[in-house]
Image: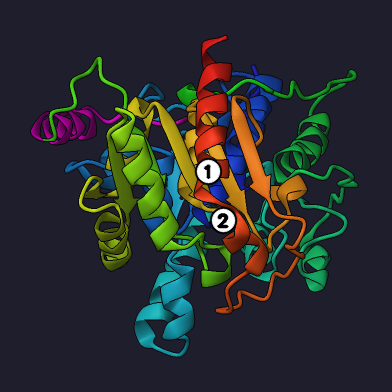
Amino acid sequence: MSAPLRVLIVRMGAMGDILHALPAVASMRAGLGEDAVIHWLVEPQWIDLLAVNDAGGLDAVNSAPRGESKPLVDVIVPADVKRWRKNLFSGETAREYLALRRRLSANNYDAAVDFQGAIKSASMAWLSGARFIVGPRTAREALADIFYTVKPEVDSEHVVDQAFDVTEAAVMMFHDDEWQTNEPFMPHPEYLPRDAAAEAWVDQQLTKLGITKDKRFALLTPGAGWPAKQWPAQKFGELAYTLVKEGMPCLINAAPVEAELAEEVVIASQDRARSVVCTLGQLIALTRRASVFVGGDTGPMHLANLLGIPTVALFGPTRPWRNGPYYQPSILLRSPQSEVNLSHSNQRDEGLESITVKEVMEAVKKVMSQAKS
């Protein structure tokens, strides 16, 4: 009997990009078989998207079988590349890099699959010593493809479908017959880990706010990767005020570094909304319970969409046909004034800012109605 196939996934960040890759990895497991051993190379801050990393530590996580707390992958391999780049010539960075190289090469991977298409991710895939290095023919960074031995054409527009294009090529290397990915057009909450401790924390927080399990609430995320992608905090606050006035409690989600932004929204809501600062694992649990989500082109929006939460996405300079919500129920709002600009500009997008609270409120009602039908 032949040994199970061993595959390394390389998608180190960021949050939305990892979420976009999950369906393709699920499809890959279906194509390679349940006994395939799948490792995932990821930056430490995003581990909670793949597994519940509790007090037992990552070694305990990796030794446990797949299940609700670790649904898709067998082993998570952390690579703190961002920190290494800040301390490129330090002894600690060199030691950690060499340790990672030894760890990867010891696994004798049959394939390494790079969904990222960047030089750093492609070089990490090559570093693994895998028999095949799979990555898109037209990589995001031009020199990345020199590391690939298998270069599928990626013709799809949406990044979720692009990941499927790469997956299909990876699986076909080990198939004697025709095989095609099954694209999951329905949301897939089962792809994300369930954390009992995070669920208990959410219960506690909602109880404090008077939100019972049977009561609806809206989850709003005002932050985004850069200011041009952010709908104004003042408008988020006005939206929250309107929602609460109509009987829908509003929670403002923020990462710890965005606490001030969340508080700005709370003030603009005339203190009708409540801010919730939480970890990534807690955010997953909190989002599962939301009745509707409103936010920009950011990780929490893609999280809500994958979980099947009715989603209103507010877009400005980024490309909705590539990064917009993939699953229904969802509504995307984007002004004709907005033009594509991926420069990570701090300058506000006039088109995004022109979207009115009334338009968003109408979209919230419509997407929630769609969810019921």
- Span of residues in magenta: 191-208
Q: Neighbour class for label 2 at 10 Å: few (<14), some, many (≥20)?
A: some
Where is 247 relative to 103, above or below? above
Label 1 SS? helix
- Percent x, y for residue 157? 82, 45
What label does residue 219 carry, if any?
Answer: none
Residue picked out by circle 2:
105
Q: Residue furthest top?
A: 373
Tell me the residue at 74%/20% (across/down). 182
Q: Nearer the viewer, residue 282 or 309?
A: 309
Q: Nearer the viewer, residue 285 or 348?
A: 348
Mark 2 / mark 1, whichever is N-terminal: 2
Q: Nearer the viewer, residue 21 or 209?
A: 209
Where is 267 relative to 2, above or below? below
Q: Amino acid at mark 2?
A: Ser
- Circle nearer the viewer, 2 or 1: 1
Q: CA distance from mark 2 to mark 1?
A: 56 Å
Tell me the residue at 67%/22% (across/down). 184
Q: Is residue 113 visible?
A: no
What label does residue 358 carry, if any?
Answer: 1
